[in-house]
Amino acid sequence: MASPEIEALTQALARLPGLGPRSARRAVLHLLKKRETALTPLLRALETVNERLSTCSTCGNVDTSDPCAICADPRRDQRSLCVVEEVADLWALERSRLFPGRFHVLGGRLSALEGVRPEDLSVDRLVARVSGGGIDEVVLATNATLEGQTTAHYIAERLESFPIRLTRLAHGLPVGGELDYLDEGTLAQALRARRPID
Amino acid sequence: MASPEIEALTQALARLPGLGPRSARRAVLHLLKKRETALTPLLRALETVNERLSTCSTCGNVDTSDPCAICADPRRDQRSLCVVEEVADLWALERSRLFPGRFHVLGGRLSALEGVRPEDLSVDRLVARVSGGGIDEVVLATNATLEGQTTAHYIAERLESFPIRLTRLAHGLPVGGELDYLDEGTLAQALRARRPID
Ligand SMILES: [Zn+2]
Ligand SMILES: [Zn+2]
């Protein structure tokens, strides 16, 4: 029906999570009809992000600057570090505005099944950050899945010799639940009731 | 939470139909994580479409060429013309692959309420196409709304002196229904049973 160029745009949009082929077609039609107010702003925003996109060499967040806006913000509590599996989890916690400290993105979780080992995650970099000093508390905010909890225990072992409070999000997270899908209320409760790793 | 650049991208996506703030954030995160396979292809597709986007000076379709792919296709039946209100309606009919002819996009519908008059639509251009000859049938595929039907009647009057079959989509369209939202089965039935304007 449409030109190959418009087809390519439709398919690129349809591959985004939350958009199917039908809603992608609607979105494309909207972009074509509203060139000045929709297509151009989206294009410019993508160009800018594409130019500046980088992974924060401190925490692993993705942002348009390195260090990322969170690591560079002097108002954030530098003595408190929250360890998450993925950037999506960091964003979920940031949306809730509950955690005043900084983050550390592991880049996944330990998984025998998927062959993910400690050296595949940024655990060594986390240990280095902690051993650098100045950190009082590390909150392990891995998912409440078996693999997430295994990862938390592994990290707890790696950090046990440091003079820090090591805590994890309270249960209250639904078992098997993934952080990124939780509402803010649940996240708030879990964070408030965080407790030391046994 | 995110940099202004990433916020701008999220907002540009959130304004697309079918995407809210939450799914836009998910989409952005996906784009940031899959730079090579998601962000770059979407950016290139948008750039190409933005460069080549034009409105077909023959039929009013939006495409990456003028004349559009439909008007330029020699296999389409040039003796049959389907008049629609909006480009979205043209696309809905094209998706169903039911109409073998060409189109004419009015760019709206007559509306006393919204102050849309005949000269605001491409009716004169339609009359010019028909008076140019070579057209046997004009199918009036305006929406089954009061304004759509008023528009169809007005066009029928403007075309009554020409030696053409003037038809409209059969009722069978749900009353008040907009073409763009119908399933293909309903569209197929309505097109098959099209009948002369009284
Ligand atoms: Zn950072
Ligand atoms: Zn055309």
Image (cartoon, coloured by chain):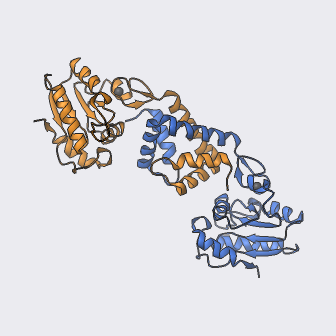
Chain colours: A orange, B blue
Residue furthest toward the top? A132
Given residues A56 and A78, the one toward you in this image is: A56
Image quarter for ligand 2: bottom right
Work out whether A178 lies above or below A105. Answer: below
Q: In the rendered image, which quarter contains the N terminus of chain A?
A: bottom right
Q: Residue furthest bottom?
A: B198
Give the quarter of the image for residue A96.
top left
Q: Position of residue B183 (x, y in %)?
A: 57, 68
Residue drawn at point x = 32 percent, y = 45 percent: A180
Between A144 and A26, the one nearer to me in the picture:
A144
Spot occupied by residue A98 in the image (x, y as percentages of width and height):
26, 39
In this rendered view, identify the residue nearer to me: A114 or B78. Answer: A114
The residue drawn where x is 69% and y is 45% is B53
Residue at (20%, 44%) from the top-left corner? A190
The x, y position of residue B175, in whole percent, is: 59, 76
Quadrant placement of the C terminus of chain A: top left
Q: Which residue sits at x=17%, y=43%? A: A170
